[in-house]
């Protein structure tokens, strides 16, 4: 209650400042309020000049280091949903708490990159891959601080994020990111603590370009195995006494999963090409004007200190040039005037000479102005590329108290691992080097496509315990080659095809082919986009499906077949009506997955827990259709995403038939400066046998128990107010306002209920230094 009061007081104070702005009429970028009189009475030397604001962000292709334009997340729209592990549109199943593992309900949103270390995949909301990381180039140093909070010191959630970006000149950009998530948990034995620190740098030259990225991450998750009896949530009336969420018993206690991982990425290239003149961007023009004004201010200061000598120099120089030009004897001929005899002719020569001088000086000034906002652009023709990527992982599952007969099997007892103690550890690192040669598109009118060829060497190392709990090593070295044909320039038509095959190593015989294309054209005064993508993958199951050793789970599956996954996808987007349609067809052969089984006893304890690796030989077909529609009527906005899915084998690949996100809100301004979105959003999916969660493996698995559990068919409603004032965004939200009503089946994973009604507060502020 005390924390809520503080948040409301903060909001009231902010509103008071906004209304006060009607009189003061100015809030600067640092959040300080100043008046027009103060602004007009500022130092004439320009000490009140506005700091140039501008930032370009881009992502980098992990293989080639290509730069792809991106946009930073600076809008207040849906800002409140960035605090949720379940995703901005609620499309993920999770364990309910901040920072807990998750899995996408919509199959086409699940990763297909084939990452070997599967234990970090459920933390995709926290771990940012190279392809999604935003490199920056700023006109001035920029800092962003974000804070999210709910609850109290006993059961609340807190998240703090800090981003900083700065440039050393126009070519070198650098910065860091910090992210700390701490979810204490509204249910027992549910706390989470996640930490990330990332440093990055880039050099963008004409001939040489480089990107460097280093991050270190830690995830610590307390595992409670879910609540013992779902009736505590769905039918609380069956109990003689009422239970708060913190009093509901859970299956496990004193159990933890820990992931520690470090990542290093370095990509650089050398370009061969030529220069040409192109117009500056709006941001570059503003930066140039700022620099010119600053130079004039400096000259004015020096003139005042030195008695007026500095500023006169440039004007004297111009006058000397003008006199010199006017005094040349052939200036009249330049302008087509002939000298005449006598005094009158001499006067005409002087007049014509002066006119010629003025005209030529005007032409020179005009030419200088015309070229002032042009820049030299280097057009690369050929690139030599090298990319290095190193990832290091460590995963520990530790338990000091395990229920009797909870696991069906035990494979070793060694050292201190006696009784119910568990200490399962695995390590993995991978070193990948790629060299590539690129012939780039766009250097002349005949170069309609870019062409790349590459060779990749990948060294993988794994460590698992043997039957004596000693370290057992596995090494895999693979070499692959491939190529890419692409067209990314222009506005109408783009395409790209990438193919890779493995020649040497454990992955020999693998094949990956990816293709994308899009066509953009005008229709009824706006743009229509037709896009298509497809891929064909023939890949080995990743290492931990083939080998895993722990005290209670154990498998060596060298005979697993290659997984064949094909996808065809089409997208229609019409900007005018803000309509997007997506259709996808997936076919999977030898689909490989985890299956978990256990027995729920009469006293609701669990016994005989097992996790196995299964492979479906028969092809599985999955159809997906998705509609994304936004509607606006004055200040009323209604946005919806409706996804329909159908799996041909629900027992192996379960997905909900319908997944819905809808958001209805009013958009208006308070005191003409404070932007506000006031509304409610809803998440809903039809009931299905969703994947269960295995605490000992830290993975989601298909249900294989005798008593299967369905979840879904329950709406989750949030009510919120989003605000944006200059460079600050903040929100106040009541999540799950319908808790305790209807069917009360608010589970996103079997036996893991969602939090009850909770009040959230969030703030994000940009500072320009």
Image (cartoon, grey):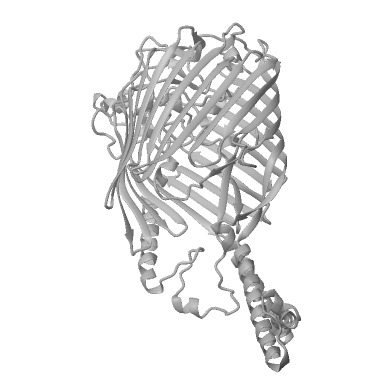
In the rendered view, tell whether residue 23 sits above or below residue 637. below
Image quadrant of residue 537? Answer: top right
Is 31 drawn above or below residue 553 in the view shown? below
Task: Locate residue 661 relative to residue 704 in the image: left or right.
Answer: left
Q: Nearer the viewer, residue 620 or 250?
A: 620
Front residue of this view, candidates 166 and 246: 166
Instruction: Using the image, determine if residue 601 lies above or below residue 352.
Output: above
The answer to whether any part of residue 655 appears in the image is yes
Q: Is residue 441 left or right of residue 18?
A: right
Q: Residue at x 35, y 19 (%)?
A: 646
Can you see residue 91? no
Q: Residue furthest front?
A: 341
Viewport quadrant of the C terminus: bottom right
- Residue 30 lies, in percent from the top left, at 51, 63
The percent position of residue 164, horizontal first and vertical second, equals 59, 51
The location of residue 668, given as percent across then percent down, is: 31, 56
Please give left or right for residue 354 compared with residue 102 in the image: right
| Residue 283 point in image, percent of width and height | 56, 58
Q: Is residue 526 left or right of residue 115?
A: left
Residue toward you, 34 or 204: 204
């Amino acid at each position: 209650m005390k924390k809520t009061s503080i948040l409301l007081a903060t909001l009231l104070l902010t509103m008071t400042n906004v209304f006060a702005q009607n009189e003061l009429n100015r809030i600067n970028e640092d959040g300080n309020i100043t008046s027009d009189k103060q602004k007009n009475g500022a130092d004439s030397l320009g000490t009140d000049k506005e700091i140039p604001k501008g930032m370009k962000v881009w992502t980098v292709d992990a293989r080639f280091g290509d730069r792809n334009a991106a946009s930073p997340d600076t809008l207040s729209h849906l800002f409140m949903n960035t605090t949720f592990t379940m995703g901005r549109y609620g499309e993920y199943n999770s364990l309910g708490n901040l920072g807990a593992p998750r899995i996408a309900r919509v199959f086409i949103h699940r990763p297909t990159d084939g990452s070997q270390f599967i234990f970090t995949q459920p933390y995709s909301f926290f771990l940012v891959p190279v392809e999604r990381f935003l490199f920056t180039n700023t006109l001035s140093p920029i800092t962003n601080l974000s804070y999210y909070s709910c609850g109290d010191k006993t059961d609340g959630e807190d998240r703090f994020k800090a981003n900083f970006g700065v440039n050393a000149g126009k070519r070198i950009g650098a910065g860091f990111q910090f992210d700390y998530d701490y979810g204490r948990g509204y249910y027992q034995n549910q706390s989470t603590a996640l930490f990330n620190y990332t440093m990055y740098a880039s050099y963008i030259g004409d001939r040489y370009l480089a990107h460097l990225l280093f991050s270190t991450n830690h995830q610590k998750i307390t595992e409670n195995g879910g609540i013992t009896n779902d009736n505590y949530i769905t039918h609380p009336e069956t109990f003689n006494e009422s239970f708060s969420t913190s009093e509901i018993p859970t299956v496990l206690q004193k159990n933890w999963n820990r992931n520690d991982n470090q990542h290093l990425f370095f990509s650089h290239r050398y370009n061969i090409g030529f220069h040409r003149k192109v117009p500056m961007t709006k941001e570059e023009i503003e930066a140039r004007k700022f620099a010119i004004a600053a130079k004039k201010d400096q000259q004015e200061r020096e003139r005042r200190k030195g008695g007026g000598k500095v500023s006169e120099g440039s004007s004297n120089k111009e006058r000397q040039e003008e006199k010199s030009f006017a005094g040349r004897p052939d200036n009249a001929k330049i302008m087509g005037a002939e000298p005449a005899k006598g005094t009158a002719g001499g006067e005409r020569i002087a007049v014509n000479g002066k006119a010629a001088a003025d005209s030529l000086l005007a032409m020179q000034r005009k030419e200088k102005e015309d070229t002032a906002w042009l820049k030299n652009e280097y057009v690369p023709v050929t690139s030599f590329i090298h990319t290095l990527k190193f990832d290091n992982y460590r995963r520990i599952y530790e338990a000091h108290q395990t229920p009797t007969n909870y696991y069906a099997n035990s494979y070793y007892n060694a050292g201190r691992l006696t009784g119910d103690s568990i200490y399962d550890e695995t390590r993995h690192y991978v070193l990948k080097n790629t060299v590539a040669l690129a012939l780039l598109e766009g250097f002349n009118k005949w170069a309609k496509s870019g062409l790349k060829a590459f060779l990749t060497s990948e060294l993988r190392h794994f460590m698992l315990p043997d039957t004596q709990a000693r370290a057992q090593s596995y090494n895999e070295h693979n070499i692959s080659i491939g190529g890419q044909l692409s067209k990314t320039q222009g506005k109408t038509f783009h395409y790209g095809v990438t193919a890779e095959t493995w020649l040497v190593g454990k992955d020999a015989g693998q094949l990956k082919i990816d293709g994308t294309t899009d066509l953009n054209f005008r229709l009824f005064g706006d743009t229509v986009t037709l896009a298509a993508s497809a891929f064909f993958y023939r890949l080995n199951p990743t290492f931990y499906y083939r080998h895993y050793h722990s005290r209670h789970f154990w498998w060596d599956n060298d005979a697993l077949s290659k997984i064949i996954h094909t996808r065809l996808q089409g997208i229609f987007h019409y900007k005018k009506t803000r309509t997007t349609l997506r259709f996808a067809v997936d076919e999977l052969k030898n689909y490989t997955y985890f299956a978990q089984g256990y027995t729920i006893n009469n006293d609701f304890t669990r016994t005989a827990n097992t996790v196995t690796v299964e492979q479906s030989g028969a092809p599985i077909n999955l159809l997906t259709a998705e509609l994304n529609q936004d509607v606006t009527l004055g200040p009323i906005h209604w946005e919806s995403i409706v996804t329909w899915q159908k799996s041909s084998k629900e027992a192996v690949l379960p997905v909900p038939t319908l997944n819905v996100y809808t958001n209805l809100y009013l958009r208006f301004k308070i005191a003409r400066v404070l932007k506000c979105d006031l509304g409610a959003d809803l998440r809903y999916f039809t009931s299905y046998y969703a994947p269960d969660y295995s605490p000992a493996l830290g993975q989601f698995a298909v249900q294989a128990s005798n008593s299967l559990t369905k979840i879904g068919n329950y709406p989750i409603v949030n009510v919120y107010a989003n605000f944006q004032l200059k460079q600050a965004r903040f929100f106040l939200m009541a999540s799950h306002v319908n808790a305790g009503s209807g069917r009360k089946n608010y589970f996103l994973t079997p036996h893991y209920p969602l939090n009850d009604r909770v009040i959230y507060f969030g703030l994000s502020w940009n500072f320009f230094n």
